[in-house]
Image (cartoon, helix red, strand yellow):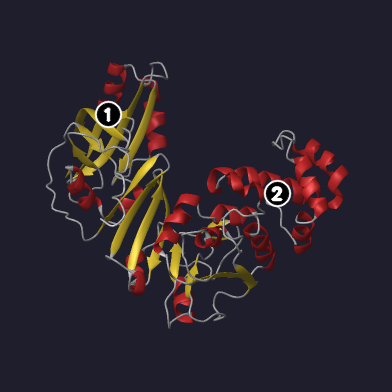
Amino acid sequence: MAYRFALSDVRYLTAAAGAEALAATDGLPLTDATLLADLTRVRAVAGERAAAVVETVRLRRRAAGKLGPAAAAWLFTDEALQQATPGPVAAHRAARLAGVGVHDLTCSIGADLAALAAPGAAGGLVVGSDLDPVRVLMARHNLAQGMNGAERPPRVFVADALTRTTRGLLGYADPARREGGRRITSAATVPSVDELDAAHAGRPPVLRVPPGIDYDALARPGEVELVSLDGVAREAVLWPAELAGPARRATVLRSDGPGEALTSDDPDDVPVGPPGEYLIDPDPAVVRAHLVRHWAARHGLWLLDPHLAYLTGPAVPPGVRGFRILDHAPYRERTVAQWARRDGVGTLEIKQRGTPVVPDELRRRLRPALTGPTRQAATLVIARIGRRPDAFWCRAVEPAPVPPAPPAPPAGR
């Protein structure tokens, strides 16, 4: 169970004694195997605050990959870190809010505020509030650490997101997607989309919600943007009418190169045809934004079935993991086992879409046929084509490098 921080813990951690204890603890392994022994050593310098110190150091280590090395001086709760926006995603959202005064209504420990207040980001007045005084105190500390490069940290105060506490600022909210340790994937966030819209009816806020949300059921005016980072869907953003573009947008961000964006206004005229040389699974942001046809049209691909998200074509777009089709037949376990024995496969990845097949259960049944070395791998894709499930016996193809973005034109052109 995660440690529950109190205000007194935060005050200790931000004082000189806490800083010394954190520095002394940072050199300890703090693994599951060493934790009890490490706690004993930390108690010698932190006393009753040892658990808070150890939890903070462990959370900072986890935060480095998500928020960057500067988060090494931040304070977190476990739940707040889980929900915090990865740095590139927060920076992208802040860029869309450039020049707009923003009130982060659910600022938590300040991760989104840091992006909004960074030089060249929002550009307008930025303030934050949260109902939890512990997180507000953590946010004040975090934003004072210089992570965002701003000259002056945004003002942060305790307030309920369902109350009006500022004027002239556009609300932004990232309502809780976990309650009692359970992940929320519907519109029933805490507070809910309906509650936030009702409380700020005069100027609907920007809302960050779970990427799996049924946004069609919300029927909320404006734009829905699905954002992914390195192939993982990270968020859906509900943009109000004043900032909306097309009805739907997919933004694909990559850590190793330029990303990609497409919208519901892009061309979507693609044919349905037989399997080509490759099978391609589009980025989850594209799939969840219902823009598979648009993405296929952009990259010269076609559909295997009008209702299937898998695509096919002569080449795999850069930056995308694809599968070279080696065999294709109506799905039968006996056929798949024959392919595995023929190719001496020892490791089998199984993907399915639109069928009742459970990959882990099928892999157990196929184990007698997987007699080859583990380095000999194959991918089985089972997909419903028309009225029947088809099997595609494939070899995974690692993504080709994404070409660098073209240089910006000279100023004045």
* Horizontal side of residue 371 vs 267, given as left or right: right
Helix, strand, or loop for circle 2? helix
Vertical relation: 402 (above or below) 130: above
Q: Residue at x 34, y 30 (%)?
A: 398
The image position of residue 149, as x and y in percent, is 57, 55
Closest to the observer: 225 or 70?
Answer: 70
Q: CA distance from mark 2 to mark 1?
A: 45 Å
Q: Which residue is mark 2?
A: 56
Foreground label between 2 and 1: 2
Residue 331 shows in the view: no
Closest to the observer: 257 or 194?
Answer: 257
Vertical relation: 335 (above or below) 256: above
Q: Residue at x 38, y 29 (%)?
A: 365
Q: Residues within 10 Å of mark 2 (few under 14, many from 20)?
A: many
On residue 394, the disc is 1
The image position of residue 114, as x and y in percent, is 55, 59
Closest to the observer: 333 or 53?
Answer: 53
The image position of residue 344, as x and y in percent, is 33, 16
Q: Residues within 10 Å of mark 1 (few under 14, many from 20)?
A: many
Vertical relation: 19 (above or below) 201: above
Kind of residue indicated by mark 1: Cys
